[in-house]
Amino acid sequence: MEEKSGRDDKGFRRLLVWQRAHGLVLFVYKLVEKFPKSEMFGLTSQLKRAVVSIPANIAEGQGAGTKPQFARYCDVAKGSLSEVEYYLVLAKDLEYITSEEYKEAEQLRSEVGFMLYRLIASIKK
């Protein structure tokens, strides 16, 4: 059954930026498994909430129906991405993750950021 909007049946899942953001979520979830239990309701919770917000807002925005709404949700995702950036720095500085893990996470985060920036620019044209 074809959607009225003309989008394919995969919706947001077809967006490369969503795919990369989802990959970042999976990577971060593996990272936080080794955080101290004392951080369960602190940094672990905050980092997970922020990272999940990125692809969730992309998905919600894509389904919102209008370009301005999509751009607004993508802006929210961009804000969450900045939060994740700080939480990763903090996790590294607290030695919850190694420098290599940080570099890998930051590379993924940076890639999502670039793609999100380009998506927002294309939506606002």
Image: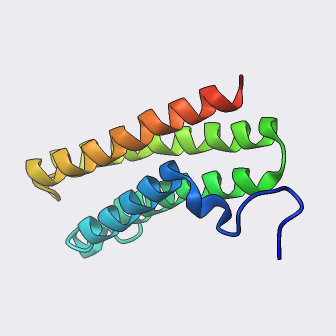
Q: Residue at x 52, y 55 (%)?
A: 18
Left or right of residue 119: residue 6: right
Q: x, y (%) of residue 115?
A: 47, 38
Residue 61 vertical placement versus 67 (above, below)? below
Q: x, y (%) of residue 90?
A: 26, 45
Q: Residue at x 68, y 62 (%)?
A: 11
Left or right of residue 72: residue 115: left
**Quadrant location, the C terminus:** top right
Q: x, y (%) of residue 76?
A: 62, 42
Residue 121 vertical placement versus 31 (above, below)? above
Q: Residue at x 16, y 57 (%)?
A: 97
Report whether residue 110 is seen.
yes
Q: How is the image coloured?
A: rainbow
Residue at the far right in the pictured view: 4
Report whether residue 82 is seen.
no
What is the count of numbered marks? 0
Q: x, y (%) of residue 124?
A: 71, 26
**Quadrant location, the N terminus:** bottom right
